[in-house]
Image (cartoon, rainbow, N blue to C red):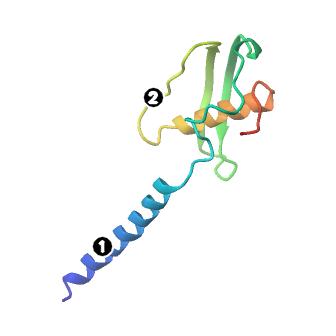
Amino acid sequence: MNLMIPSISAVKAACVAAQGLYSAIQSKPIIDSLNEGGKKLNPNELVERLELRGVIFYYPSHPQKTIIDALSLDIYRGESLALVGPSGGGKVCMYACILVLMIQFSLISSSLH
């Protein structure tokens, strides 16, 4: 019986995780990429180039740990950008920082429709 107790705990934890996963799969996303409606970006309204120089980012709760250190990047209109790297390497953080900067400097709208 004592050998079964850890296994029961693992099964229970797996059931809870599965429930969360199924809930996420069944939820309707805020942004529907298949919807033809909504605002379309006019390429002529976009800036020719987005230039980032020496961007540094750290979370306010951990200022001693720099997440992005001196990022410099040029993104030209019409180009595609891929961020690749290991899990936990800061790809999502870097993408979020770029979006926040674009919103702050009114390069894109901050509203989602």
Residue at 80% x, 27% y is 105
CB atoms at circles 1 and 2 under 8 Å apart? no
Task: Name which residue type carries label 2.
Answer: Val
In depth, the one of 87 and 71 nearer the eye is 87
Question: What residue is pinned by disc 2?
Answer: 84
Q: Kindly indicate the quadrant of the structure image that contains residue 35.
A: top right
What's the residue at 18%, 82% (across, down)?
3
Check the image and report above or below for 62 versus 67: below
Q: Position of residue 99 (x, y in %)?
A: 68, 32
Direction from residue 48 to residue 64 in the image, left or right: left
Quadrant holding the C terminus: top right
- Mark 1 residue crowding within 10 angstroms, few (<14) / some (14–19) / many (20+): few
Residue 94 in the image: above or below residue 8? above
Q: Is residue 12 positioned above or below 70 on the image?
A: below
Residue marked by disc 1: 11
Q: Is residue 92 above or below residue 60?
A: above
